[in-house]
């Protein structure tokens, strides 16, 4: 009886059927995680670049409309901000000589869209400084 069990176990050790499917199962997890990571990486930088553009456009709005208030500039940023982030916008004014500068800062949090890691969120910040006459 023990001899038969030993022969059976040895035959299992020599069997190579199904090895490719096991290798695929192990490798596909790593490949899938790399693909999801690349998509999330691209999505984060899309939101970052769009927020940079929106803040820069708000700076141009402040230059072309020198009588606009800080809340007008904040509205420009929040109404044009990309989906996936609701920024907190601060506008500060500093005077250097006869020129007034406005610094527009937008900060927000980007949650991952894949939902594989729901506890992970990334911070995004954009800032510009423009002269207002």
Image: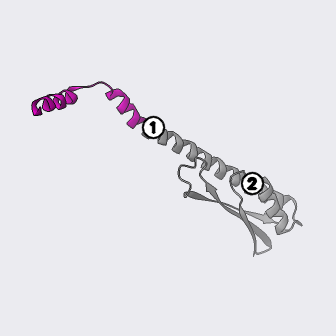
Q: CA distance from mark 2 to mark 1?
A: 33 Å
Q: Seen in the image, is 69 located left or right of residue 44?
A: right
x, y percent for residue 29? 44, 39
Q: Is residue 133 visible?
A: no
Judge the density around disc 2: few (<14), some (14-19), many (≥20) Cα neighbours within 10 Å. Answer: many
x, y percent for residue 122? 58, 57
Q: Seen in the image, is 77 located left or right of residue 32?
A: right
Quarter that holds the C terminus: bottom right
Would you say residue 26 sits in the magenta stretch?
yes
Judge the density around disc 1: few (<14), some (14-19), many (≥20) Cα neighbours within 10 Å. Answer: few
The residue pinned by badge 2 equals 81
- As drawn, the residue found furthest toward the left would be 3
Residue at point 80%, 56% (across, down) = 79
The residue pinned by badge 1 equals 31
Q: Seen in the image, is 66 located left or right of residue 122?
A: right
Name the one closer to the observer, 25 or 113: 25
x, y percent for residue 86? 71, 59
**Quick check: 133 above or below 34?**
below
| Image depth: mark 2 or mark 1 in front | 1
x, y percent for residue 14? 20, 26
Describe the element under mark 2 as helix, strand or loop. Answer: loop
**Quick check: 19 above or below 51?**
above
Q: Earlier in the sequence, mark 2 or mark 1?
A: 1
Describe the element under mark 1 as helix, strand or loop. Answer: helix
Q: Main secondary structure of the magenta part?
A: helix
Residue at point 77%, 59% (across, down) = 78
Q: Seen in the image, is 7 located left or right of residue 46?
A: left
Q: Which residues are magenta?
A: 1-28
Residue at point 79%, 63% (across, down) = 74
């Amino acid at each position: 009886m023990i001899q038969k069990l030993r022969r059976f176990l040895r035959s299992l050790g020599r069997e190579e059927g199904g090895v490719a499917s096991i290798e695929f199962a192990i490798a596909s997890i790593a490949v899938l995680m790399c693909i999801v990571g690349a998509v999330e990486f691209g999505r984060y930088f899309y939101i970052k670049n769009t927020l940079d553009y929106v803040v820069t456009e708000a700076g141009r709005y402040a230059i072309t409309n020198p009588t606009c208030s800080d809340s007008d500039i904040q509205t420009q940023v929040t109404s044009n901000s990309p989906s996936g982030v609701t920024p907190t916008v601060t506008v500060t004014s500093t005077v250097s000589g006869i020129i007034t500068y406005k610094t527009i800062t937008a900060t927000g949090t980007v949650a991952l869209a894949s939902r594989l890691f729901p506890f992970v969120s990334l911070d995004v910040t954009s800032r510009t400084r423009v002269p207002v006459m």
